[in-house]
Amino acid sequence: ELTVIDRWLLAKLARTADRATRSFESCEYNGALQAVEQFFWHDLCDNYIEIAKKRLYADEGGSEPERRGAQYALYNALLAALKMFSPVVPHITEELFSLYFAEREGIESIHISDWPVAPDEWRDDAAEEAGELALAVIEGMRKLKSESKVSVATPLGTLRIATTQAVWDLVSPLAQDLAAVSNADGVEHVAWNGEGSPGEGFVETENAGIRVAAEIKETE
């Protein structure tokens, strides 16, 4: 059972594989490396793993189908990233592949495995758009905590998201993931048309049409 953020990751992976393939075929090796590094560090490590890590453990509130969906997305993203890195860093990718993927894939070397080609079902413009909006909310939440001089793990009350109804309709399916990554009690929509201020305590995000606010909880 893939959630929206799982489908966002796979859609980003599909675009990255397309770009890396074109760059390698054109002998633009730096462009290929930049694409894979952006996906690996920004999309996968900085964001997806932080968002999905609680779902990866069914005993922390996630259902078994949701855990399996996160495992599927993470496995395919890691495997594809290794393959795309392998022409540039052949030895470490071979070692990691042999340790974690070779037996399951039935191939003894990453360098004789198939190059990543994304299936059509991974190409999902709607999930990409929703995921990027969710990242703007997360960026705003991190900014809120930074301005309050607390760690990103500090618990919050309800995370309030000020935006239009159209944007909220895209973001709301990710409410559970947003609450988990924010360590918030929940998520709620504050209707706002993007003009003026949505209220006291809201911080700007990288998306001009989204602002966030939340109460910082006291910690011992």
Image (tube, rainbow, N blue to C red):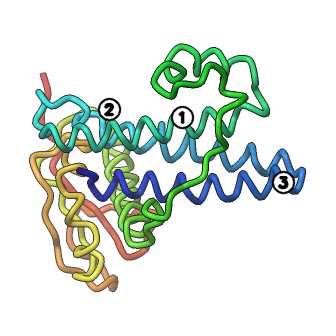
Crowding near pointer 1: few (<14 within 10 Å), some, many (20+)?
A: some
| Horizontal side of residue 171 vs 96, given as left or right | left
Q: CA distance from mark 2 to mark 1?
A: 32 Å
Name above or below for residue 210 compared with residue 60.
below
Task: Report the residue at 43% width, 65% height from top.
Answer: 128
Q: CA distance from mark 3 to mark 1?
A: 20 Å
Q: Earlier in the sequence, mark 2 or mark 3?
A: 3
Which SS class for mark 1?
helix
Task: Report the residue at 18% width, 61% height from top.
Answer: 160
Which SS class for mark 3?
helix
Crowding near pointer 2: few (<14 within 10 Å), some, many (20+)?
A: few
Crowding near pointer 3: few (<14 within 10 Å), some, many (20+)?
A: few
The residue carrying mark 3 is: 25
The residue carrying mark 1 is: 79
Name above or below for residue 35 compared with residue 207.
above
Q: Identify the disc placed on residue 151.
A: 2
Tag 1: amino acid:
Leu
Q: Earlier in the sequence, mark 2 or mark 1?
A: 1
| Horizontal side of residue 210 vs 35, given as left or right | left
Task: Say which of 102 and 52 sits in front.
Answer: 102
Task: Report the residue at 45% width, 24% height from top.
Answer: 104
Asked if disc 2 and disc 1 are in contact, CB closer than 8 Å, the reply is: no
| Horizontal side of residue 141 vs 156, given as left or right | right
Which SS class for mark 2?
loop
Task: Report the residue at 19% width, 48% height from top.
Answer: 179
